[in-house]
């Protein structure tokens, strides 16, 4: 199942079937970080919603988008996205 991208109102914006599968990873450390990182190719009606105000639902876990990097390789646009679990909002003082 592909991650779903939501806006701050909880509306589904996109199902991310443009993720480069081998780059997707969830890292969970006891009493430490809980992150989801991935790369994706640009795709209409999907990558335009990569925004730090939006969230991702992955394996029934919700992550905030924290960092977005855009690269141009061989005529293609690729995004590298770093996400942090929503439980860290309170710890960050947000």
Image (cartoon, rainbow, N blue to C red):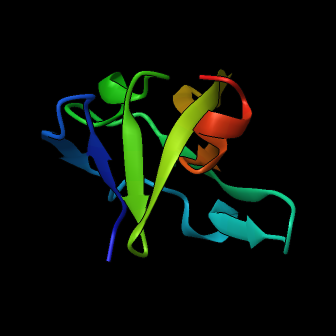
The image quarter containing residue 48 is top left
The residue located at (60%, 36%) in the rendering is 89
- Where 35 falls versus 11 (above or below)? below
Q: Residue 76, percent across and down?
A: 52, 31
Residue 92 is situated, as x and y percent measured from the top left of the image, at 72, 29
Q: Nearer the viewer, residue 78 or 25?
A: 25
Measuring from the top left, give residue 22's x and y in whole percent: 65, 70
Above or below residue 79? Residue 16 is: below
Instruction: Say left or right for 67 vs 27.
Output: left
* Res. 79 visible in picture: no
Residue 42 showing in the rendered view = yes
Q: Is residue 19 above or below residue 45?
A: below
Seen as rendered, the residue at the extreme left is 11
Quadrant location of residue 59?
bottom left
Q: Tell whether 11 sits left or right of 51.
A: left
Identity of the residue drawn at 12% across and 39% down: 11
Given residues 29 and 75, the one toward you in this image is 29
The quarter of the picture where the N terminus appears is: bottom left
Quarter of the picture holding the C terminus: top right
Marks counted in the figure total: 0
Residue 19 % position (x, y):
47, 55
Please tell me which residue is depicted at 54% across the width and 35% down the height of the picture.
Answer: 65
Task: Report which quarter residue 69 is drawn in.
Answer: top right
């Amino acid at each position: 199942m592909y991650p779903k991208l939501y806006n701050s109102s909880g509306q589904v914006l996109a199902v991310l079937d443009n993720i480069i599968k081998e780059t997707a990873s969830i890292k969970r450390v006891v009493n430490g970080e809980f992150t989801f990182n991935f790369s994706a190719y640009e795709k209409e009606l999907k990558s335009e919603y990569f925004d730090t105000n939006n969230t991702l639902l992955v394996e029934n876990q919700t992550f905030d988008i924290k960092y977005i990097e855009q690269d141009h390789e061989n005529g293609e646009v690729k995004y590298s996205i770093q996400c942090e679990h929503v439980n860290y909002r309170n710890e960050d003082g947000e």
